[in-house]
Amino acid sequence: MSYGLYVHIPFCKHICSYCDFCKMVPSNKELVSKYIDRMINEFDLYEKYYKDVETIYIGGGTPNSLDDETLERVLQKISSLNINPKEYSIEINPELLTLSQVNLFKKYGINRVSMGAESMDDNILKLLGRHHTSEDVINAYNLLKNNGIENINIDIIYAHPWDNFDLLNDTIDKVLSLNPPHLSFYTLILEDKTIFKYKKVKMLDEDTVSNLMDLVNDRLKDYHHYEISNYSRNGFESLHNMIYWKSMEYIGIGMGASGYLDSIRYDNNRLLKDYMNSYRGEENTLDISDKKSEYMILGLRLLDGVSRSKYKKLFASNIEDDFSLYKLLKYNLIEINGDIIKMTYKGYKLGNYVFEEFI
């Protein structure tokens, strides 16, 4: 069995208006140092798994909001685990990226960087609560590429309340001019406990969102659209995220991190004071029914779909016996081609309706 390793750095310089991830703006360096001390000790709980870890992902929050000395402490600890990952990723905010950070990435074997660009329109970035410019994105991308890091993902958020065809087209033009090997285009979801939710911003109607999704897929037709929101070139699919989508197991370390080990899903405590007292918050042991549901919901996110024969091998039952597919087939939300069940393009655009059938 192989595993993924996720490490959560919750600190940010600013809080974005749409973000519901576990995050905080630290009040002082001492707080950050205490958190890192606590998190580094958490690694020791999972020692028996590290020999089989294939991917590492450092996320947040904003991992590159740490100063170089603190970031290196984290990277040194991970290095001491003697993992030889196929993919080693870190998330960054473009305005914070420095050459010294890039050199640290290379020194410790990080070979993939995921950049939160979110938009290439400076006015939209301000409305989203971001603190960088489109020029920062371009400069950060070039800094990475010119220093030997080729595997770069750019995140874009679209279908936000101010979006339209011209704005989205312009962002796509600017992103494609960089020719990144991987792109993630996420429609904005109004999450609880966010600034946007508090301000009750008005979201776009479903038809407009659908039309904007059509635009993205048309403009990115030269990429391999392999997951609902993800597009790659030249085999640069996200190996770490594939672990999630294929219902494989992974270690989650840090405040608010989630993990899935030995059929147990767990969430670490999201509040700093709780995390400093006890790492784990909720735990949930998945029974066979839970595993079947998750396998279908996560697997159908992949445009290649799920294998009926693999499902039968894993669960000793048939998908058609475990779930009613009639409604999804009737409304052309899924299709069955031999061994493969996958969402249609219509189903992909109405993914939540599809997933509800497997809950």
Image (spheres, grey):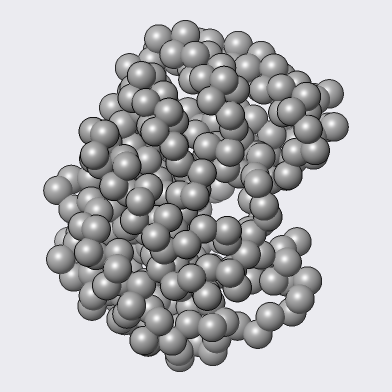
Compared to residue 127, the image places residue 87 above or below, namely above
- Rendered location of residue 229, percent (x, y): 38, 62
Nearer to the camera, 323 or 37: 37
- Rendered location of residue 332, percent (x, y): 32, 81
Q: For residue 50, what is the image quadrant?
A: top left
- 350 left or right of 272 in image: left
Nearer to the camera, 148 or 23: 148
**Residue ID at (48%, 70%):** 122
Nearer to the camera, 52 or 66: 66
Q: For residue 336, what is the image quadrant?
A: bottom left
- 64 left or right of 79 in image: right
**Residue ID at (32%, 49%):** 141
Q: Is residue 304 visible?
A: no
Nearer to the camera, 153 or 31: 31
- Rendered location of residue 100, percent (x, y): 43, 28
**Residue ID at (51%, 58%):** 132
Compared to residue 222, the image places residue 80 above or below, namely above
- Rendered location of residue 268, percent (x, y): 70, 34
